[in-house]
Each structure stands twice: as C-alpha cells, then as structure tokens.
Image: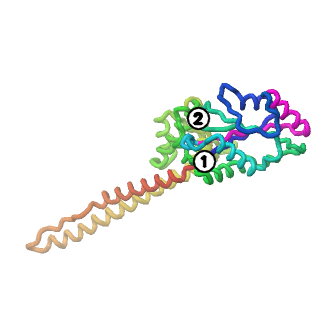
Amino acid sequence: MIAKIVKGKSFNKCIRYILDKEKDAKLLEAQGVRLKSSGVIIHSFITQAGLNPKLGLSVCHISLSFSTEDKDKLSSEFLVKVTKEYMQKMGIADTQYIVARHIDKEHPHVHLCFNRVDNRGKTICDKNDRIRSVKICRELTEKYGLHIARGKEKVKEHRLKELDKTRYEIYHALKDAIPQCRNWDQLQGRLKEHGIETRFKHKGQTDEVQGVVFTKNNYSFNGSKVDRTFSYSKIDKQLRGNNISNAQTQAQLNANQTGQEQSAGVIGSILDGLSGMSVFQPHGEDYEDNQFRKRLDYEEKKRQRKKKGIRR
C-alpha cells in the first residue's frame, strides 16, 4: 500500500478527475456532500472551504495504491475500510470527503479527496503528513497481510517513462559494476560501456568533490537520486574498500608464495643430500587456487549483503 498526497486550490479539477467516467470511476463513499451531480459535489466542497478563506490550499487529494498481487482480496468494502482507517490515523476527521475507485490501471487504487477546512471552519493539520503517511501505510500493509514490494528489482521497467527507464538502467549498471571496481577510473570505464557518462561536482572553485552525476540518453541524475546507496561518498567508500581488500589479498598471496618457495628450497637441499631417497616434491592443494576460491566466495557473500542493503 502506497499513498501519494497532493494539495491544491481547485476542487473542480480534483473532483472531476476522481469521478471521470473515462477512468471507469466508481464512487465508493462520501461524507458531508450532496451527491446529485459532480457539479453539486464540487459546490458542496467550495461552500465549506469558504468558512476559512485564509487557507490557500484547502484541497487534499490522496491516491492509495495496492499491489496487483492483492487484487483478489481488494473488494470495494475492504478498500473503504482501509481508507477510513488510514484517514483516522492521519487525523483526517470531522470534514467532507469522497472516495472513488479507478480501474484504468493494472494496479488497484482508490482516490480520496477531502476538505482541509473541517466542519467547524478549522484547518486540518498537515504537518509531516508525508512522513506520517509512509509509516501508516506500512502499518496497514502489515496488519492486513498485503504484499510488500522488495525494492527496485520489482519495478516493471517496460512500463516506465523514458526518464525513469533511463534512471533504472543507470541503477542496474552501477549495481553490477561497483563490486568489480577498485577506483573511479575503472568504474567510469565500465559505465561508459553502457553509454553512461560520469561527472563530478566540486565545492565552489576547489578540487574537493562533493557529488557525482550520471548521464545517459541526455538525462542526468545525481548519484543519490539514482539510489541512496549511490551517493558519491557511499560509492567512494565501497571503491576504497574494494581496493584495500584486493591489496591485502595480493600481499598475503605474495607472502605465502615467497614463504613456500623458501621452505621448498631448504627442504629440497636437505633431502638431496640423503642417499637412497627420492627428491621431495611439494604436493597437496594449490594455495593460490584455494585463495582464489575463498576470494570468490567472499565476493559473492559481499554482493549478497549489498543486495540485502538496497532499499526502495
């Protein structure tokens, strides 16, 4: 369950959109308004808003969207119940409202319009409404066992507009490339293979890097706008970590290889001096192969941890 909140001045535009017959709109619930026609409903809202003419944005339009995986359980009665509970938790009470269902999209959703001027002429508070809304949607989703989307991998990219489609292409390219790179030059090279240009933002006229911008198809995005995990500081930290880890692994490999060569030489000299015995040959599992497999296992576990860390 996801809510989108929009505030405005025109009840006329909002109500006509919500009750648009071309969207197969179905009015599910109404309170405090006359229902003779769309025009009469609009007039009812405008009349009450006149009780508090100083309030500029008296219209609040909220769309509540649900996953297609919950389609079978989302009856009109259930949608009204969830919408009312959402309103109660948001502090939307003692005011006019209408709730309508649209079936013009694949995902089930309803539209709520309410008057921010309540029945006594007081303003319904909207402080931190979007933050509160996210929390309440999560609570209701869990309470009623509704489907919870698991991040950007669930987005249907073929339905995205060009701007968002490009953003997701950059997202996937970064997601795949960063674990394989040890510095920005390597990362820029890999991204360029996907048609993505990288540009750094500096602090004032200094050389201090403050951010990074990725561009593809003439669309540019700050790293953090692609995803919170792709801000300049977080990518830089990951690249530094990759480089340190690689250097430590290589140093360990070199040290062990040198130690093995020295030990083999000493032992070989001793055994060569003993008559009637064959020369000793080192045997057993190759150290570098073993370390390489360990490294692959480590990288795979690290990628899995990184995947779990990506949030929508």
Question: Which quadrant would residue 77 be assigned to in this image?
Answer: top right
Q: Which residue is pictured at 49% across the width and 36% down the height?
A: 192
Q: Relative to 136, does residue 44 appear above or below in the rendering?
A: above
Could you tell me residue 178's position as x and y percent?
49, 47
Q: Which residue is mark 2?
A: 164
Tag 1 near tag 2, CB within 8 Å: no
- Is residue 258 among the parts visible in the rendering? yes
Could you tell me residue 247's position as x and y percent?
44, 57
> Which sits earlier in the primary sequence, circle 1 or circle 2?
2
Q: Relative to 55, does residue 258 appear above or below in the rendering?
A: below
Span highlighted in magenta in the image = 38-66
Q: Which residue is pictured at 53% across the width and 35% down the height?
A: 157
User: Which is nearer the eye, 185 or 113?
Assistant: 113
Q: Amino acid at mark 2?
A: Asp
Q: Which mark is residue 308?
A: none
Q: Residues within 10 Å of mark 2 (few under 14, many from 20)?
A: some
Quadrant containing the N terminus is: top right
Task: Give the Cα distance between marks 1 and 2.
Answer: 16 Å
Q: Amino acid at mark 1?
A: Arg
**Number of callouts in the render?**
2
Could you tell me residue 84's position as x and y percent?
72, 46
Question: Which quadrant would residue 262 be assigned to in this image?
Answer: bottom left
**In the image, residue 259 lies in the stretch drawn in magenta:** no
- Is residue 112 among the parts visible in the rendering? no
Q: Residues within 10 Å of mark 1 (few under 14, many from 20)?
A: few
Could you tell me residue 114's position as x and y percent?
78, 39
Q: Which residue is pictured at 47% across the width and 44% down the height?
A: 176
Q: Secondary structure at mark 2?
A: helix
**In the image, residue 50 lies in the stretch drawn in magenta:** yes
Farthest residue, direction top: 22
Q: Which residue is mark 1?
A: 228
